[in-house]
Amino acid sequence: MSLPFLPGNSPSRQLGKERFHKSQQFGYAAGLPMLVGLEKPGIGGEPVVGQSIKPNYSVYPRGQGRDMPSWVAFDKQVLCFEAFFQEAVPVSQDETYRIRRCKIYFHLEDDTVQVVEPEYKNSGMAQGILIRRQRVPLPPPNDDQFYHIYHFNINQQMVLYSRTFTLTNCDSFTRNFLTRLGVRLNNPATVPDDPYSKLREEIEKNMKPLRPYERRDTLKQFLEHDDKVLRFNCLWDEKENVFGDPRELILHYYLGDDTVEILEVLASNSGRDAVPKFLRRGKLPKHSVQMRQPGQIAERTVLNVISPTSQEQRYMLDNLKTGAVHEEFYKDCDLTLGEEVNVWGRRVTLTDCDNFTKDYYRSKYGIEDFTPVVYKVPPAPTPPRGVPPYNGFGSEEDSLSFCQGLHPKPPQKDFHKFMERCSVLNFCAKMVTTDPFDRDRVFTISFFLCDDTICMFEAPQKNLGMLTGKFLQRGRVKKPGQELFKSEMSEYFKAQDLYIGATLSFSGMNFKVLDADEYTLNYMEQHAEEFPKANVGNGLSKLRSMPEEKRSEIRKCLTLSDPSNTGFISYESFRGLLTGLDCGLSEHEVLVLGRSFSEREQPEADMGLMLAVAQDFLKKKPFEEFPDLDKAFTSRDLQKTGRLSTKETRTICKGFHLPLPEKLLGGLLSKFADGDEIDYHAFLAGINWVEHPAPIIMPEDALKFEVNAARSGAAWATVKNVDYSSLLRDVFSFPSNSGNPTASTTT
């Protein structure tokens, strides 16, 4: 029993509905108003009564199968069908119709169809893509719909744009896909024969000879040995002929196709015309003396079956090859040193070969003897070219370039040495003289490794009574005792000539090297193979080679110098002992030994002074990006520990262009470092002059810090104590007498 149709008794269809929009039914086409909404749905997207909305794309509804759109689920999946269609040919006498094969591709992602016809040689027709990829409508009267997957099956006909295609077969993927979809596939169909294609095949078959040519496959040899050439030096001796002389040749054997090419080597002023090639590239027969005429040798031979005296001449192919000419050509196995090669009647002797040829014969044929054939007297040695003595004008290198050619070139400098070795070695020296006034003058000798130049400066002293500063202009300095006007190049001071204890002569004045800075000593010790005086091994070898009596005396003196048996003695006592016992060691070698077995202390910098100087630098620039710097540190601190490595901290400071000198920045990082990590919050608080200003420093305090920093980085070497017990164990293999010596510190 149904309820009466009254309000409240019937369910409302609008319950739960949220969309109530109306489709646009009218619009403009070509500037004219017209009805365009015949196929559009009604209110809320629901179809109007009696309206059926046709699907625009795939027949698969969204609610079935995978929960993905078709263009994702069926991406790059294509069904392939083999088909043909019959085309009428009304204007040809040889054919009335033509069977054209093609392939139909159905793209599952958007229901598009593509028809492609394979291209045939000399077909005379436009082939390739017959129908571009698109959605193809069904034939009338259903032309408002499009082909989808259920329209495809083999052994059936399809009409695509008024052209009837017959589907004959499909590939395995298409067959499996349609079978899983529930489509029952028909049996494959056969393609009817094309009469005109069969006619063309018969014509091409008749054009081929009854006996095919012999196949010679040389592709493998070409691919394996392409661009590989054997090179031989040859000699053609034609002294037997009138005005003949030995002629040098170069033979090239190409392994890719077994061809030979010969070039002639013409000496200067030989009187012969220069030709591109002595023998052009080709196969070289072994026993031919004269070149044959064109057509005299062919790959196929013919026989005359009728007498040539008759009016008609008939020929037939020589299937048995009775008249074939077989020639033997040179191979790589026929070319060995000392053998003669017949080059069209000319006897050419192989005298030598290059390294590639030797490796080839050694690996393939196992030949080891490649002794060259000597066929001419070795040339007389060129007499040395004398160089006139230096005349005093310009530099010696520049004057020598004028003697080496008509167009002199400037002397070439060692650019690699200039770029790679940019260090400067600094030494402290005093003048060797009897004058008490000049005896106390202190000089700094700087040696530039990039160009082996030397310059000297005199350190300022109070109440000296004379001007100080530059003493020697930078330049290369000649060693004393050399003749000025001579043919040989002069010898200049090198880096190996400068060491502690050496006596140098500059401009007629003698100087003795007394000391060197820390950087110089470290550089010389790190490059001990270039500086023999800084090689610890050389000094130890000299001590080990001393007689037993001398070694006992050294041990006794070292032990007496340490009455407390601590294992350490002062460097001055160590130096005086080795110098007084005449051990054959120079001052520099003694210093190197002391540094190797020593303990040294570096002066500690004042933390407050360093922070004050750093804030003074940042204030003068000025630098106020401390919040951004703090954010950069925090972003790199992934664990939020408040610490970063020294390398990362330095990188961030360099990225923000922190205006601090390199030595000052390195000193601050080392002060705030705890192992390999730095508390960046404390570091930022120390250099932040905006929030935590340091006391104002005076100019003399800043100068004091710079001097201390310079001394800490490049100060004159100071060795405090020497661990002589370790020296005795390493050099003389003597046990130490001290009860519990302090462990040695090696630098």
Image (spheres, rainbow, N blue to C red):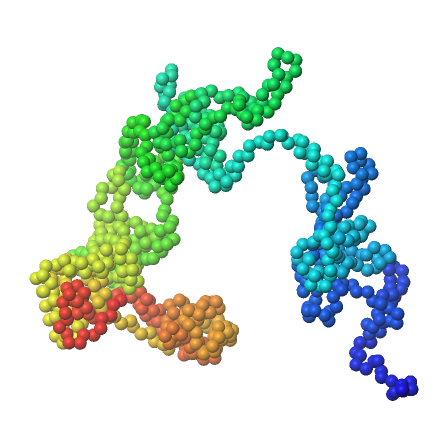
Residue 47 versus residue 262: which sits nearer the camera?
47
Residue 351 percent across, percent down from the top left? 35, 30
Task: Indicate left or right for 659 with 405 as reference.
Answer: right
Looking at the picture, does residue 546 appear above or below residue 646? above
Quadrant placement of the C terminus: bottom left
Residue 529 percent across, percent down from the top left? 27, 55
Looking at the picture, does residue 680 appear above or below residue 158? below
Image point (37%, 20%), residue name:
238
Q: Say whether residue 409 is visible.
A: no
Count of marks, rendered view: 0
Image point (34%, 76%), residue name:
606
Task: Indicate left or right for 198 with 44 as reference.
Answer: left
Looking at the image, the residue that sits furthest to the top is: 309
Residue 643, image quadrant: bottom left
Looking at the image, the residue that sits furthest to the left is: 549
Residue 312 percent across, percent down from the top left? 65, 15
Residue 167 versus residue 328: which sits nearer the camera?
167
Residue 389 versus residue 28: which sits nearer the camera?
28
Quadrant placement of the N terminus: bottom right
Image point (31%, 29%), residue name:
374
Residue 75, image quadrant: bottom right
Looking at the picture, does residue 235 appear above or below residue 607? above
Residue 400, image quadrant: top left
Image point (72%, 70%), residue name:
64
Q: Say whether residue 251 is visible.
A: yes
Residue 80 percent across, percent down from the top left? 69, 54
